[in-house]
Every structure is written in C-alpha cells, then in structure tokens.
Image (tube, rainbow, N blue to C red):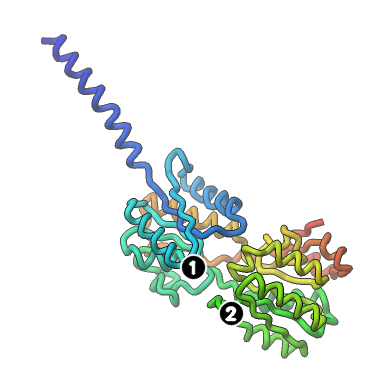
Amino acid sequence: MKRRNFITALASAAITLPLAAQAQKLRTPRIGSLNRPSAGTETFGDAFRRGLKQMGFIEGQSVVIEGRWPDGAESLRDAAADLVRKQVAVIFTADNGGALAAKATTSEIPIVFLVGLDPVAMGLAASINRPGGNATGVSFRVSALDPKRFELLRALLPKASLVGVLVNPNNPNADANALRSAASSAGLQLLVLDARSIDEVESAFSQLAQRQANALLVTSDRLFNLERRLIVDLAARTGIPAIYPWRDFADAGGLMSYGNSLTDAFRQGGLYVGRILKGDKPGDLPIWQPTRFEFVINLKVAKTLDVEVPSALLAFADEIIE
C-alpha cells in the first residue's frame, strides 16, 4: 500500500507541476501597446521600459508587451478591439487617435495614454486631478510653448522682419493666433504656411525662399515629426534658421529645438502602467503634465548657416551639439 500510495503521489505531482507552470505563465500580465509607427519609436520604447522596470516589471520576464502598429482611424479601432479580445491587462498608447479608439472600445481595461491635446476636452477623463473611469496618462500642451519658441527665435535673430510658421491645419492643435499676437507686439510679419502632406511641406519651403523669410518656426504635428529629416534638409537647402518642437529635430540636424522631454514622458507612462499592474486604479492617478523642458542648440548647423548664437542663448541651453 505504501508503494502504491507513493506511485500515485508521484503521478499526481507529474501532472500538477506542468499545470502550475502553465498557470504561472498565464498569470504573466500582458500590456497592449497601441501606437502608429513614428519617429524615435525605439528610443521612446526604451524609456517606457525603464519606467516599467522602476516598478519591478521587466519585459519577457515579468510582463509581456503585445504591440499593434496600425495606420488609419479604422485600423486603430480594429487594433484596439483585438487587444480587448486578448484580454490584456492594460492598454498603452502614445497616439491621440489610439487613446480615443481604446476609450471607445473598452470601459473596463485600464488605459494609459500620452496625448498632445486636452484629455478632458477629448472625453478621456473627467478632470486632470481625478480622471475617473478607466483612463489616465500624460498630457502635452505643445501649442502653448509656441510663443516661447518665437521668443527664442527673436533672441537669435533680433533683426528679423519676416518669420514663417509651418502648420498642419488638420491638427486640432493648429492655432497660430498666439503667434500672430506675439509677432504683432514685436512689429514682425508672420507668414503662416499650411502643410497637410509632404508636397505641401516642400511647397511651403519654396514660399519661404521666395518671400525671403528670415526664420521659421515648425509647430508640432505627426506629419512633421515623421518627416523631420526631410524638413531639416529643406531648411538647410534654403538656408533658413528654424526652431522645432522636439529635440529629435536638433539631433537630426535642425538648428534649435524647445519642448517637453518625450523620453521623460514615456518613462512616466511606463511608471503608470506599472502602478496599475500593482493594483492602482487609473481613475485615481492624476494626469501627469510635464514640467521639464529641453532647449537644444546645434552649433554645427549654426556655423553652416553663418548664424552667430548669442552667449545668453548658449547659457540658457540645456544641451549644445557641437
């Protein structure tokens, strides 16, 4: 009887161990990443994983990330629905459309977003401090920094009389009124150039050259961010000093950039996902509004354009590329 009991127990253990291992594997939380392809994806992904790691989650060990990279509004909705069907623990999206698609698809699965619009006005949250519902994250107000960028351009080129502004009118953030007011106060003429496509971007630079504009301010837009190398090259070819919204432009050969730290925001997104995986409710996590700004000057480009950067600007810069 003892031998029979031993064999029975051994057989039971042989069955139980694989099942336990399988159950453990099934308990590994899965994060649904809903994002359209964009510039800097690898760098920002690393920052997101750093945030996760700070909360004790390592991809491939204690957490799995399921990525979806659709293109177009309909595809975003389809991808969001697929992640819901797969019962992911959290949906992370750094896309305005992705956040709206996820919110429209599920009211139960937590959502962590990075958006460039007002999340309350978008219908993602009840308020900044207490979002309520199933969504929270990071909110950029990128257009609010355009007057500061304009001020930096004026400091660089105090004798400028005509400044161009590159805007995508299809972007809800596209609002040049604050810049028009700043230009009027400074006695400068503003040339607002609409660009909804690559062809219109190239046409805008032709107009800048024809009008002999002294400088250019590029507003934040998905198209411009994706085509940053083209825009930087066009600025170099036309010999026009420009300021951009993100440091990626300066890294790619742009003259100056001023804006929030995107890597810091993605890290914060990872932290929030980690907190939710540990049990925090998204509706209780205040929407994070970045307060860290980066001013980057590319001195190599300044020399190429024969632009002398004032010492006061150099002292104000967070980073100088030489």
For the residue pair 38 and 298, the one nearer the viewer reads as 38
Q: Quadrant of the N terminus?
A: top left
Q: Residue at x 68, y 83 (%)?
A: 192
Q: Are the two marked residues, 2 and 1, in contact with CB atoms closer than 8 angstroms?
A: no
Is residue 144 among the parts visible in the rendering?
A: no
**Picture disc at residue 96:** 1
Q: Amino acid at mark 2?
A: Pro
Is residue 82 among the parts visible in the rendering?
A: yes
Up the image or down, 291 lies above or below 37; here it is below
Residue that carries the numbered disc 2 in the rendered image: 169
Q: In the image, 153: left or right of 180?
A: right
Q: Quadrant of the C terminus?
A: bottom right
Q: In the image, 294: left or right of 44?
A: right
Q: In the image, 42: left or right of 66?
A: right
Q: Position of residue 247 (x, y in %)?
A: 68, 62
Measure the C-alpha gap from mark 2 to mark 1.
Answer: 16 Å
Q: Amino acid at mark 1?
A: Asn
Q: Residue at x 65, y 65 (%)?
A: 293
Q: Residue at x 45, y 58 (%)?
A: 34
If you read the primary sequence from the N terminus, does the residue marked by circle 2 or circle 1 appear first?
1
Q: Position of residue 65 (x, y in %)?
A: 45, 47
Q: Position of residue 253 (x, y in %)?
A: 76, 60
Q: Quick one: which residue is furthest to the left in this view?
A: 1
Look at the numbered disc 2 and give the secondary structure of its residue: loop
